[in-house]
Amino acid sequence: MGTVDQHTHPEHRVHISYSRIVELVETGSNVLDLGCGDGELLLRLMREKQVRGRGVDIEESMILQCISKGLSVFQGNLEEGLKDYPTGSYDYVILNHTLQMIHDPAMLIQEMVRVGRFAVVNFPNFGHILNRMQLVFGGRMPVNRNIPYEWYNTPNIHFCTRKDFVELCSTLKLDIVRSIDMTRRHTAPPFLHNLLATETCFVLTNTHRS
Amino acid sequence: MSSESTPVAESLGIVQEHTYTFGPPGVPITLENGRAFGPIDVRYETYGNLNAERTNAVLILHAFTGDAHAAGFHTAESKHPGWWNDMVGPGKPFDTNKYFVICSNVLGGCRGTTGPGSTDPETGKPYGLSFPVITIRDMVNVQKRLVDHLGIQRLLAVAGGSMGGMQALEWSVAYPEMVASSIVLASTARLTAQGIAFNAVGRNAIMSDPHFQSGNYYSDQLPAQGLSIARMVGHITYLSDESMGMKFGRKLQERAAYGFDFADQFQVESYLEYQGDKFVDRFDANSYIYLSKAMDYYDLGERYGGLDFAAARITAKVLVISFTSDWLYPPYQAKEIVFALMKAEKDVSYTELNSPYGHDSFLLETKRQGRLISSFLGSVYGNC
């Protein structure tokens, strides 16, 4: 079955594509995908990068889809952290488009860099110009392609801007190894990323880990 | 993928029972307690056909009071199908159009396999309490002899709930090379103190029945009252507060208002009494004692120096399912198995189905559990 390269597809320009995440991961590594959904990303990682992969999701329907694909999957709640996962047991721990839904994102990120050599985190950038305009000129909470929910029904409870996240990493003493910024049409110079990136993906590591 | 391509699930119709006998004069089995034991009759049933490569065999492992009759009917007149009829048959999760399904009665049972009610060839009388104390590993070793006898070198899957799940786990660590996948439902690597406590009450009820006579009751009156109470206690542990509330509430069985006399019977009382009475007709009190003790003794990690070491032996792809309202085999215990397997970098999947039916969920939530199992088996069979 053919996989569409999402980042070349105009409908998907706002999100970091699976292809970009697949590119980040070293061949043959060990991957834990938190909030793995239907397991499509894991499946691509296994096929294209021969990783040993495991997924975690909270939804029964998603677990069923992962099992149908022959994946190893665990039904669990990320709010409980990763206490049963030994330190350094994975090369990569991925949190794809889920950070903003977590009650204690700082705790989860720290857990991710404890369990994995690298954490791969991506999230919608609340600092994007469209969000700012909607708030400044419309006087209302931003609702757009990037963040398509009303304030009362959004699963997203912890929005941050790209800049906020970089600051959190420095507070937590985490190193940003790589970043990928999705902009709508053109590539933007780094100093404009906080304004123009719809979504950002960071690869983090904890070099201070004892 | 689509539902149109799935054949409509139907019953297996009439199924046959078989008995395989081994042990002296042939090779007996060495029990976990060190004693050589035999001869042993194994009652079993099979459904579907073994393929030419012998790669589609699934061994189903029954729970405490189950038997070899997992699906279909024994006679055309019979109203009661096998105990897992919703899960086993053509087009069902354990699809007999694809898989060769085997189910046998456990060692120590009373439904055709040698147990305390069987005749001891040395005395010509039933074993009673002279029957050796058996373990989950002993049950598995007997099943292994059956699987060898059927000419199967590797099982596509071993699958069971509750005590059946213990056997599935034990199969996976005892004979890793023979097990391609393992399905563990509502089960544990070792029973909780609470679980042991309930089993102890059951055994005490039986042993304190005046008709028990140290287990030598076979030619006399049965310890029916004790066995019935044991079953009543058991049934309470298989349900949940929520399912009892839904099923019975506080309703009376025969009256509309309380009479404030002992003739009043709540529906839940009547149900338990009925379950207890029905059980006495089909189950041997000594088997209750032996099998419940085997569950109490069970500790997957014990012989290997801990659960992590036992998990490291497993090569099978494992599916573990627990149920939120199961307080006898609680989800946290299922997760202990899963995390041990994950630590050992094994291929394991886990789901915790939200269900109100307590421990009995693995017999009742057949649709959701069935979808998971059929997908899991399909992916394992596809990779064979």
Image (cartoon, helix red, strand yellow):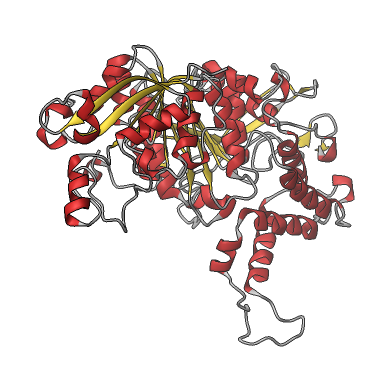
Q: Residue at 75% across / 47% down in the picture? A: B199
Of A75 and B263, nearer the camera is: A75
Looking at the rendered image, the quarter that the C terminus of chain B falls into is: top left
Q: Is residue B250 left or right of residue B155?
A: right
Q: Would you identify the image quadrant in which residue A43 lies?
A: top left
Relative image position of residue B335 (x, y in whole percent): 57, 36
The residue sitting at the top extreme is A27
Looking at the rendered image, the quarter that the N terminus of chain B falls into is: top left
Relative image position of residue A165 (x, y in whole percent): 36, 33
Of B259 and B189, nearer the camera is: B189
Q: Residue at 20% across / 51% down in the picture? A: A136
Of A187 and B241, nearer the camera is: A187
Of B123 and A198, nearer the camera is: A198
- Residue A185 visible within the image: yes
Q: Is residue B87 left or right of residue B145?
A: left
Relative image position of residue B240 (x, y in whole percent): 60, 58
Q: Residue at 77% across / 52% down in the picture? A: B202
